[in-house]
Image (cartoon, helix red, strand yellow):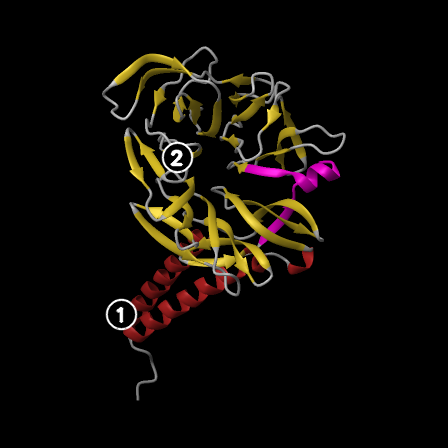
Amino acid sequence: MNAHPTRKGLLGLIILGSLLLASSSQAQVSYSVTAIGGLSANEARNFIPTDLNNQGVVAGYYTGSGSEASSLFTWQTGDVITRYNTMGLGLQSGFGYKLNESNQMVGTLYDPDARRNKAVLWNTPNSPVALSETVSNVWTNNPSRVISASQTGYGATGGAINDLGHAAGTVNLWSSTPVIWRDGSPTVQLADVVNPYPGFRAVNAMNNADQVLFDGTALWDNGTLRYIDGMYGNALNERGDVVGRTNGMHAGLWRYGTVIDLGDLPGGQDSSIARDINEAGQVVGNGSAQDGAHAFIWQNGMMSDLNALIDSGLGWTLSSALAINDQGQILGKGLFNGQARSFLLTPMTPMPEASTWGMALSSLAVLLGLRRCQQR
């Protein structure tokens, strides 16, 4: 009997070993947890996080409680808090305040005197600009048929911003009309009406190609409107992937017109929702577990409970993951020692894709080495 494995046998052992190492590496992926701090007790407890950029800057707001006024701000590790000037206008809960990589922010403020919303762009924290509500070349139903050279709306909302400083939102004309502002100057009119059909109420996301996700149901791409069937979308990455919730009440990924069901966490109510996706294709959100909602990450075809990937002795229960950046950092909400808090997770290991590729290349090197030995 030959006591030495054949080349085919060696290859099989190497592949099996690589898969086991990859599985073990993924199972051991862990995160450090940082509480969003530097705030008053009320602010920390009631902080509503809305966005996270690749520098780890967190955007969000506090709606005020008791004698404390509402506040819009960003947070960075080290509890660096930067307050944003809101011009004495009210913050709008339910509207996202979104950041780009230059820390420009776009959002919606409420003017109680005019009794309407205003779309606002902050180039710096102390320089808010109310975006114009005058739309040029207004058209409806048929984009080749212009019905008005320009029209001024009554109220607007800001929903997304990309790294070019382009903002997207809605202007209230005859209905809420999605638009793109391609110049943040207060004297420049809105650049384009990107969808004429009534019924769209909000902009969810926008990427650097000016693709815009409307109301969770349609993606505008350079003049082409693509409806997202079978899923409600929440977020968009640079490839045009959309994540959200399928009609089957599971977290879903819409890619190239096809909806992929991402499943759910075990032991719960068979319900989950995806809230963000990064450029590596990692998806975060929350699913139903035995003891309530738990934050998850979906990567390499597998959904994992983020609570299983942190130190269980820290006192955290991670309820929902709201955003993930390209560094793999995750923004979310949960309970810290029983108190509502927001958190930032930071990977303690390399990105899973990078480590998996590294192991595959190492396995290939071993295989080539064995082949050389056999050929001698």
Rounded to the nearest angstrom, the CA distance separating label 1 from label 2 is 61 Å
Question: Along the line of sight, which residue is nearer the eye, 320 or 302?
Answer: 320
Task: Write down the residue under mark 1.
Answer: 375
Q: Residues within 10 Å of mark 1 (few under 14, many from 20)?
A: few
Vertical order, 28 against 202 (above or below)? below
Measuring from the top left, give residue 185's x and y in whole percent.
46, 14
Task: Name which residue type carries label 2.
Answer: Phe
Label 1's element?
helix
- Check the picture and name the quadrant holding the C terminus: bottom left
- Farthest residue to the left: give it: 144
- Check the picture and name the quadrant holding the N terminus: bottom left
Asked if one can make out residue 347 in the rendered structure from this viewpoint, the answer is no
Question: Along the line of sight, which residue is nearer the eye, 244 or 16?
Answer: 244
Measuring from the top left, give residue 249's x and y in whole percent.
43, 54
Vertical order, 122 against 22 (above or below)? above
Which residue is at 68% across, 36% downward?
A: 79
Labelled disc at residue 214? 2
Measuring from the top left, give residue 11's x and y in whole percent.
32, 70
Labelled disc at residue 173? none
- Say which quarter of the image contains residue 178: top left
Measuring from the top left, give residue 18's x and y in whole percent.
40, 65
- Say which quarter of the image contains residue 111: top right
Figure label count: 2
- Say which quarter of the image contains residue 223: top left
Asked if one can make out residue 11 in the rendered structure from this viewpoint, the answer is yes
Residue 215 painted magenta: no
Write down the region rendered in magenta: 31-50
Which residue is at 59% across, 22% downward?
A: 125
**Sequence-wise first label, 1 or 2:** 2
